[in-house]
Every structure is written in C-alpha cells, then in structure tokens.
Amino acid sequence: MPRKGLSLLTAANTRGNPVLAKFQSLLASVGLSRITRILPRPLRRDHARCYRWCRKQLAGKRGLELGGPSPIFRRRGALPVYARVGRLDNCNFSGHTIWEGAIAAGQTYRYHKRRPPGRQYIAEATDLQAIPAGSYDFVLSSHTLEHSANPLRVLAECRRVLGPSGVLVLILPHKDRTFDHRRPVTALDHLIDDYRRGTTEADLTHLPEILALHDLAMDPPAGNPEAFRLRSERNLENRCLHQHVFSSSTVAEMLDYMGWQMHALEPRLPFDIIALASICRPGESPRNAAFLGLQAGWRQTSPFPSDHLAGSRQAA
C-alpha cells in the first residue's frame, strides 16, 4: 500500500465502523508487513525475499531467458520481473518441446502480453555461439539447468553472453520436494568432471539411477515404468530427464567454482532454490564465504531437511 494511503487509513475516523476500528488497531500493533504475511495467499503477492534486489538490477535492462516463459517471472510469481525488464530474448534447445509445443526462431518470443516479442533462438544452452559475447545485461534460467548434462558449461556460456557486471537469476528444483527425492545429490566433483570432459546432451550416464529411483507417483505425466523408460531413452529428443540433482549447497558450490559473485541464495517452498549472482569486476575474485559451508545463513531458514546436512562434495 502506498505510504499516503497508509497514512489516511491510520488516521481514518473509525467511529461506527467496528471492522475498520479492529483493523486499525491491528495495523498499529503489528505493522503492515506482518499483516500481509498472515493474509491468505490469494490475497497477497508472495514475492521471494530477494525480489527487491532482483527487480532493481533488471529494470529496463536487456536479457536472455533459457527455456521459458516461466511462471515464477510472471505477475503472480515469486520474482515477477517480466513486466519490468526492457527487452527479453529466449533460447530453447528445439523447435518443438513438451512444454511449449512448436517454437519458431525469430521475433516470436512472447513473455508478456504488453511487451513486444523478443528474439527466439533455437540452440543448446551449452553452445550459444549464435549470440555475440557481451550481448545482454542479465540471464534468466528457471528449472532448466537440471535438464542439462553439462550444467557448468551452461554457466560458462551465460558468462560469455553477459556484459560487465551482468546478472544471473537461477532457479533450480530442490531434490527434497520433487520426484528426485530418492536420488543422491550430484557432487560438485561430478559436475566439474562433466565440464572438463565436454559431456554432451546425448549423455545417459544417470539413466540407470533415474529408472531405479525416480518417484513415478510424483510424476503422473511420466506414465507407468515402461512408458517412463521409453521416454527417458529418448532424452536427447525430449529433455525430460533431470540429469542432475541439486540441493542448495550444490548451487552455491557450482556458482562459486565458476567464478560468480553471489548476492542471494533463497531455498523456498514448494521446491525452489533461487540464486542471484553477477560477474565479478576485472581483477576481482568472488567472495562467497557467506553462502558456503555449514554456517551459511540460508541454512537457518531453508525449509528443506537436507540443506541442514553437509555439502554436496560429500554426497554420492
């Protein structure tokens, strides 16, 4: 509520209106921010805590989204930035996906009804050579990186297409609340090995583990075990597999390893890990101690049980 409107409300004459009088008393005792937290979800916007920083960094800027459009960036999402950015292009791996159907390259990417469409690229996120270096101010990626066999390569490409101090908004699914909950978290050493070996999207190293541990009860579109196996074997075509499994520790460790300066890490129900990071200035190294290790502040507020355990280097 605007400050002027709040002032009028607190100064309103409540005589003869017991409902307004009660609300005014509650407002005076606990404050507006507390009231908005206890309202039912349909009556309030449930923004992420890091939204204010994100909104400021992206307002009026040029960006690229990997995958998408994504609900989390829309008006009712936790990070509703679509309405605030200056321009947004998109990259998808194919001209037809399970999530979006047919996709055409060119000025066809519609992310907001009041904004002109952005440019649609058809390319692998691990190979964005069609995009010149330094083309964008920010990159958005929501629930996309887990589908890549080489996540660190994707992060390297994101760095390349960003200009100085470019910003990354990364959202990944936390294993504890998804159909991956039976699988071990992917260790950082494994991600590094994939990066160094140049693992391609045709890789099916994790397929036996996925077929054995994927919780089909939490993934109705996957069908029965046989249908899921057949779909999974064609992952290069459909990209439905979660190639890697993430906890919040994994996200912090891989961003730090790839040289990103972290600004926020917010584990958030129902199953999101939100990370905000930027490119370091020339000659500077990332200072991410506050986000790493067992004393990291985000562990105190994480709703996911495994976030209170050791980091991913000790995972299977």
Image (cartoon, rainbow, N blue to C red):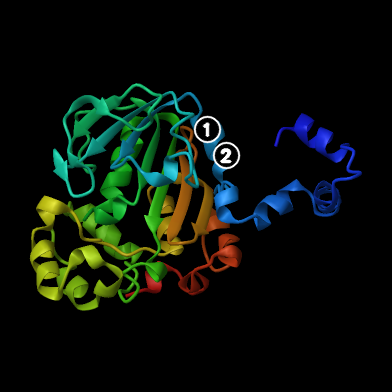
Residue name at image x 41 percent, y 57 percent: 251
* Element on which disc 1 rests: helix
Quadrant for residue 129, please give it.
top left
Looking at the image, is 84 positioned above or below residue 256?
above
Query: Residue 53: which disc?
Result: 2
Please tell me how many numbered marks the rendered image carries.
2
Q: Nearer the viewer, residue 302 or 251?
A: 302
Quadrant for residue 118, please give it.
top left
Q: Position of residue 85 (x, y in %)?
A: 45, 28
Split into 4 quadrants, where in the image is the C terminus?
bottom left
The amino acid on which the numbered mark 2 sits, given as a three-letter code, is Trp
Q: Residue furthest front?
A: 16
Crowding around mark 1 (Cα neighbors within 10 Å: few <14, some 14 to 19, many 20+) is some
Q: Position of residue 147 (x, y in %)?
A: 25, 55
Crowding around mark 2 (Cα neighbors within 10 Å: few <14, some 14 to 19, many 20+) is few
Residue name at image x 78 percent, y 36 percent: 6
* Element on which disc 2 rests: helix
Split into 4 quadrants, where in the image is the N terminus?
top right
> Can I make out residue 31 in this image?
yes
Looking at the image, is 311 positioned above or below residue 113?
below
Q: Position of residue 243 (x, y in %)?
A: 23, 61
Q: Nearer the viewer, residue 187 or 285?
A: 187
Quadrant for residue 40, please give it.
bottom right
Name the side, left or right, on which 12 lies relative to 111: right
Q: Check disc 1 and report the residue beneath it.
A: 57
Q: Nearer the viewer, residue 104 or 132?
A: 104
Name the side, left or right, on which 131 lies relative to 204: right
The amino acid on which the numbered mark 1 sits, given as a three-letter code, is Gln
Name the side, left or right, on which 127 lies relative to 144: left
Q: Nearer the viewer, residue 24 or 84?
A: 24
Given contact means CB atoms under 8 Å apart, are the residues at marks 1 and 2 in contact?
yes
